[in-house]
Image (cartoon, helix red, strand yellow):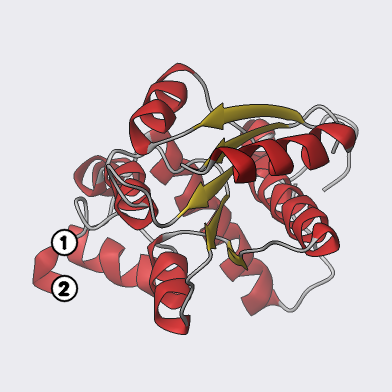
Amino acid sequence: MAGKNILIVDDEVGIRELLSEILYDEGYSVHLAENAAQARQFRSRQQPDLVLLDIWMPDTDGVSLLKEWVADGLLTMPVIMMSGHGTIETAVEATRIGAVDFLEKPVALQKLLTTVAKAIKQDFQKRLPESTAAAVESGVTEGGATTLPLDLPLREARENFERLYFEHHIRKEHGNITHIADKVGLERTHLHRKLKQLGIRVGKKEADPSTE
């Protein structure tokens, strides 16, 4: 995972410096933001491979920033929430919104490294099929290897394909349900129901309220 870009968002300079030193020593490229405003500016310029996001910050809290990224179609990277006053309710809420994990401060060294590596690896694997999206239509890559595993029961293989298919169009249309529905040829209500069935989250801003 060396060379991956990690954005650390935390208003405590000591935490930023400590996490930065640890991750830098592991070969990561580290960027720092001391508040939500700086995090927004960084995200507007580039997409990091991972964000470590503190929940309690003076200007805008981490959960609110996470919601903003979801609504604006910018949550295209894994986000790990951090807090020194974490509760189960907060962790569950952050995960429901789109965070991939939760770290409680003070963060143990091994826990940090394990969680970061796992999040980056999982997100890479999830996004990998998009780079071979054209090959999905014929079912094989140029080398003849299959984009999807074929040694699965038919139902499971079909669900995997559908999940990749809809995630591709969600990214392509930046989470806009109306545009996605037009592209895939489904009514919005049917599309929304299908996404929920596949466990795919879409920002509240784009969700169809008539199906709630």
Residue matched to label 1:
208
Q: Residue 195: horizontal and vertical position, in percent? A: 38, 65
For label 1, count other residues whose C-alpha is less than 10 Å away and answer few (under 14), some (14-19) or many (20+). some
Residue lying farthest to the front in this orientation: 14
Q: Which mark is residue 211?
A: 2
Identify the residue at image location x=83%, y=29%.
Answer: 142
Placement of 80 over or under 212, stated as above or below: above
Placement of 110 over or under 133, stated as above or below: below
In depth, the one of 146 and 201 nearer the eye is 201
Question: Left or right: where does residue 31 sit relative to residue 62?
Answer: right
Placement of 120 over or under 89, stated as above or below: above
From the image, which quarter does the C terminus lie in?
bottom left
| Picture quadrant where residue 192 is located | bottom left
Spatial CA distance of label 1 from label 2 is 6 Å
Question: Left or right: where does residue 53 sit relative to residue 128?
Answer: left
Question: Left or right: where does residue 188 sit relative to residue 29?
Answer: left
In depth, the one of 185 and 159 nearer the eye is 159
Identify the residue at image location x=61%, y=64%.
Answer: 105
Q: Is residue 141 visible?
A: no
Q: Residue 101: horizontal and vertical position, in percent? A: 59, 64
Q: Residue 210: horizontal and vertical position, in percent? A: 9, 70
The three-letter code of the residue at mark 2 reads Thr
Identify the residue at image location x=67%, y=36%.
Answer: 17
Q: Residue 86: horizontal and vertical position, in percent? A: 49, 73
Asked whether the residues under the numbered discs 1 and 2 touch, taking CB atoms below 8 Å apart as contact, a structural biologist would say yes
